[in-house]
Image (spheres, rainbow, N blue to C red):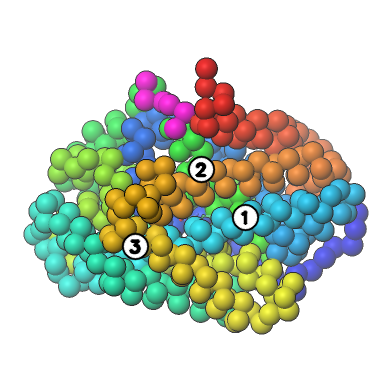
Amino acid sequence: MPARRTSIHGEWSSRLAFILAATGSAVGLGNIWRFPYVTGESGGGAFVILYLVCVAAIGLPVMMAEIMLGRRGRQSPINTMRTLAREEGRSPAWQYVGWLGMAAGFLILSFYSVIAGWTLAYALRSVSGVFNGATAEGVAAIFEEFISDPERLLAWHTIFMVMTTIVVSRGVKSGLEQAVRYLMPALFVLLVVMVGYAMNTGQFEQAVNYLFTPDFSKITSGVVLNAMGQAFFSLSLGMGAIMIYGSYLSHTASIPRTAAIIALMDTLVAILAGLAIFPLVFEYGLAPSAGPGLIFQTLPIAFGQMPGGALVGFLFFVLLVFAAWTSAISLVEPVVAWLVENRGMQRVKAAALTGLMAWLCGILALLSLNLWSGDARFTFFGKGFLDLFDWVTSNVMLPLGGLLISVFAAWIMTRESSRGELGLANGMGYTLWRVLVRYVTPVAIGLILLNKTGILTP
Ligand code: PFF
């Protein structure tokens, strides 16, 4: 085994710090904004079951592989892949997995920041009391008016991108590690409060049925792909975010246990978000398939009616901003690490440059909501830029990255290398992981992707 490398960017102060940071990356808009709306668009229960299966059978093994590769390579995903490939006597072309991830990260960050901007705006709106006593129609009208104003969206998008850039430029360790420690549990508690509220005032039973009673006739190739895409997006897999975080992880931590904790927490938050939102959707006769605006059109109704709702709404959206923030920094980190390693750039400059590029790209996403909405020149496959970036990254780029990571971890790396790094003895656990990443994940991802493109459809 080669001598152990150390990362030039530093190391987490403890295993707990890594768990918090990786959970911070995983838990974000993907759980609270994206999960409910994609569930709604994909018809409910059958999608949820498929999603859970994807998390367990694909997400968890790929997450272990990503942490393992990161910890062994100890560099940005591009350099990690090149180094590890060379070590196993393979082609340096494996570094393109890192490039693919970097491109996906850019695209995700660009629209992620726009949606995080909505969340910032909604924190302010909640506390200002505009939602007090508002009807479902009123809340929907406020939302429509908001997203049709490009200048306002741009201001919030800019603020969020600057926040993200500042944290990354200061290094992951100072500040963020601390913030995640308190804010994540707070978000969790507030979500439970929202579920409690939804239980008492909304159509809770209908929502539970909707989420957990699968109607298998609703399963199409698109729904399966959405479920897999959501698992990748929500767990931050396939683009090197978890890989770079793994590269700051100490050698003493157990990867399997750590990965399981992260996946479990992430899933729990998504389910809680579903249980908080769908009772209100049904209570107020809204369409589950309302799309990306779903939480912004449901939760404010609840905040407008509950006692102290202005404050609860404010807290909820502020915590959601923090959740988005801790995810966004993990999207920037792989790019920054690469710029520091290969271009000798200072961290501050690298973060500013990355933020600027993603900010520019975000403007395309933002304009697709208003000025360019429905304009055929800016519509591709029936989607505007925001929807397109969202769909293509989650459903194509991240799964493809995950497939290549699995193939590398299971077929390119030797048994000795992977077993040693995972810290598993030669027992059942290791065999199960290896079978999963060797056969199950690449085949499943490959089939799902091909099936959707129509190549496999009979
Ligand atoms: N997992 C994040 C969320 O659920 O909001 C989004 C995300 C972060 C996706 C980092 C991918 C990533 F690399």
The residue sitting at 37% across, 53% down in the picture is 377
Label drawn at residue 101? 1
Mark pair 2, 3: CA separation: 22 Å
Q: Dot 2 corresponds to which residue? A: 395
Depth order, front residue of 91/45? 91
Using residue 216 as the reference point, say whether residue 98 is left or right of it. Answer: right
Mark pair 1, 3: CA separation: 25 Å
The residue sitting at 46% across, 69% down in the picture is 360
In the rendered structure, does residue 221 fall within the stretch colored magenta?
yes
Residue 429 rendering spot, x and y as whole percentages: 72, 37
Tell me which amino acid carries mark 3.
Leu
Residue 235 rendering spot, x and y as whole percentages: 53, 50
> Total of numbered circles in the picture?
3
Q: Dot 3 corresponds to which residue? A: 367
Using residue 271 as the reference point, say whether residue 56 is left or right of it. Answer: right
Q: Which residues are magenta?
A: 217-222
**For the residues bearing labels 1 and 2, Cβ distance under 8 angstroms:** no
Mark pair 1, 2: CA separation: 13 Å
Residue 439 rendering spot, x and y as whole percentages: 70, 30
**In the rendered image, which quarter contains the N terminus?**
bottom right
Local secondary structure at mark 3: helix
The image quadrant that residue 71 belongs to is bottom right
